[in-house]
Image (spheres, helix red, strand yellow):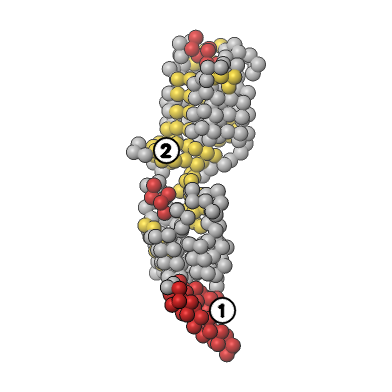
Amino acid sequence: MGTKGVIFIVIVSILFWIIGISTGLLGEAVLFGYSVCNSWIGNNTAYISENDEVTSVEYGEFSYKLLSEIAIPDNIVSIKEGAFKGNRLTSVTIPHSVTNIGESAFALNNLRSITIGSNVSLSKNAFGSNFETVYLNNNMDAGIYRRANTKSTEWSIWYKNFRYIKNAGSGSTSITGYDGTGGEVNIPNEINGNAVIAITDGAFMGKQLTNVTIPNSVTIIEENTFSNNELTQIFIPNSVKSISADAFAGNKITRISIGANVKLGSNGNSVGVLGANTGFNGAYDRNNSRAGIYTRPNTGSTTWTRTAR
């Protein structure tokens, strides 16, 4: 490094000491100054050693370097305070090897997606934007946590393409959304060992689905869950106990396989689980809610025929 470089570093260091003392943010000023000086001498890459002897990302090691992406290897166990603070990260994957993340380690980024393992100890403001509270409220479950934009403090948890919530006190989960489109979808019967027991209002609405497999862990299908798709037939497993009105409205369903004594929702205006004026709810009632395969000749018909399931 030339003389001008040394002079620059000295000036920057003195400046940040002054700012830190005058504002009471000495630690932050030192961290920022340290990062600027490191960047000046060329240490501004995001390379993290994969050597098993390296188990931590140190204090402020990659802070304020304008990084847009990072890859954290699975030899890392601990991410220290301010390690990646003040960059341009929009997403980050924390390997399952990591057990603790220090204060403000990922603060002041543009994170909208965080993939993290279970039971990671998070210090104050490790990611910021209320993530720590949401992670704790989800029992520190592994998953992909997302938010709509960088100003939002509302994070949702995802498993693959499925958004879900963990039902308090029951050891079960409910599917609340889906970000795939078109074709077939196989809904998981469990997520992180917790049975999927419900599919909530509008979770798969308008996704251009042609076929859906509902697992036999599901007991409740709520309103508009599968509405406005391209389904022509559905198989309802015996585990399902209730289906709300309009759950399958806006499809072209002519064949339904269903178990016995399922409670079918209606709004009282000829609207059943398939939507308005389809006749299915009435046909099921007239058959004493017996299990069976119910078919009709076309989508304009309200006449359903039952055969043994």
Is residue 102 at all visible to an observer of this figure?
Answer: yes
The amino acid marked with disc number 2 is Thr
Please state the horizontal and vertical placement of residue 97, each as a whole percent of the image: 40, 58
Residue 81's image quarter? bottom left
Please state the horizontal and vertical placement of residue 16, each as a whole percent of the image: 49, 78
Say above or below: 134 vs 273.
below
Badge 2 density bin: few <14, some 14–19, many ≥20, Cα 10 Å:
many
Q: Residue at x 49, y 9 (%)?
A: 286
- Image-based side of 300 in relation to 116, left or right: right
The amino acid marked with disc number 1 is Trp
Residue 171's image quarter? top left
Task: Please tell me which of labels 2 and 1 falls first in the chain.
Answer: 1
Spatial CA distance of label 2 from label 1 is 50 Å
Please state the horizontal and vertical placement of residue 297, each as a whole percent of the image: 63, 14
Q: Please identify the residue farthest to the top as the structure is shown.
A: 286
Q: Residue at x 59, y 88 (%)?
A: 4
- Give me the disc on residue 173: 2
Task: Say which of 52 and 48 sits in front.
Answer: 48
Is residue 49 at all visible to an observer of this figure?
Answer: no
Q: Residue at x 50, y 14 (%)?
A: 284
Q: Pick the quarter of the image with the N terminus.
A: bottom right
Badge 1 density bin: few <14, some 14–19, many ≥20, Cα 10 Å:
some
Residue corresponding to mark 1: 40
